[in-house]
Image (tube, rainbow, N blue to C red):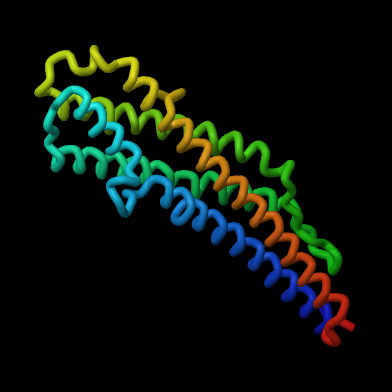
Amino acid sequence: MNELELLQKQHYENYVNAIKEIVINNTNSLVDSDINSLLSKPPLDSMDQIKTKILGLAKKEKIVLDTELLNKILDNYRKNVLKTMNEIKKMRSDYILKIVDSSLSYSSSNIIKVTKKDMIQLQKLEKKYIKQQVDDCVNRYLLKKMEKLFSISEDFFQRNEKEINKFFSIKGIYQKQLLESIDFKILVKDTILINGIKEQGERYLFTINNSRLFN
């Protein structure tokens, strides 16, 4: 391998590593920043949709709740649902890096592409997983724990079952709004990823075609 070929090979390897870094950073940002912001404890109680709903039910029933217990329940729910979201990192990065690896075929003009079509199946996998995990966490860490929270009121759940399901069930207001917000975050991140990979490819080709090192 002559010096020019060696330089071209090194430049291509740097390009591939840059693409992989974009994928990892995009995935980490999606989970650690975007999804986390939707599930973390709001800075103000008035912004806490779940807490507001539970306190509203208690007020309607004329019940004085143990707010310390309520806060512990909500904190535990958020901690556990956020923990499940970390699984998306591996699912997403593995899927996209597989596309990247399948595109690798060294030549001075070969660039890596990830398209909207490539991301459709991943979006389906992400949505299915997130929907299952959110519903499971709502049932395990909210609804079951609220039975203890409202134990001072006999037959509370029987009297308010319709309203509780309307808000907390998999087709209820809370889960529906949360999942729609997460879906939107994913779509935005996918667009950023696709554009970032495209820009990196354009930068790679520009250097190959215009740098004196390669001519």
Residue in view at x 28 percent, y 38 percent: 51
Give coordinates of residue 93: x percent, y percent: 56, 51
Q: Give percent across and percent down for residue 139.
A: 32, 27
Does 174 sit left or right of 59 as displayed?
A: right
> Of all residues shown, which one is farthest toward the left?
152
Q: Is residue 43 left or right of residue 199?
A: left
Q: Quadrant of residue 152?
A: top left
Position of residue 92 relative to residue 127, above or below, is below
- Quarter in which the N terminus is drawn: bottom right
* Residue nearer the viewer, 2 or 141: 141
Within the image, what quadrant is residue 87 found in? Answer: top left
Looking at the image, residue 200 lies above or below residue 70: below
Q: Quadrant of the C terminus?
A: bottom right
Q: Nearer the viewer, residue 105 or 215?
A: 215
Relative image position of residue 18 (x, y in whole percent): 65, 67
Q: Is residue 153 left or right of residue 192?
A: left
Residue drawn 14% across and 42% down?
A: 68
Q: For the view shown, which residue lies furthest in the bottom direction?
A: 212
Q: In the displayed structure, would residue 44 be above or below residue 56?
A: below
Looking at the image, which residue is at 32% across and 49% down? 41
Q: Quadrant of residue 146?
A: top left
Towards the viewer: 136 or 210? 136
Q: How many marks overall?
A: 0
Residue drawn at (26%, 40%) of the image = 74
Front residue of 86 and 31: 31
Q: Position of residue 25 (x, y in %)?
A: 54, 61
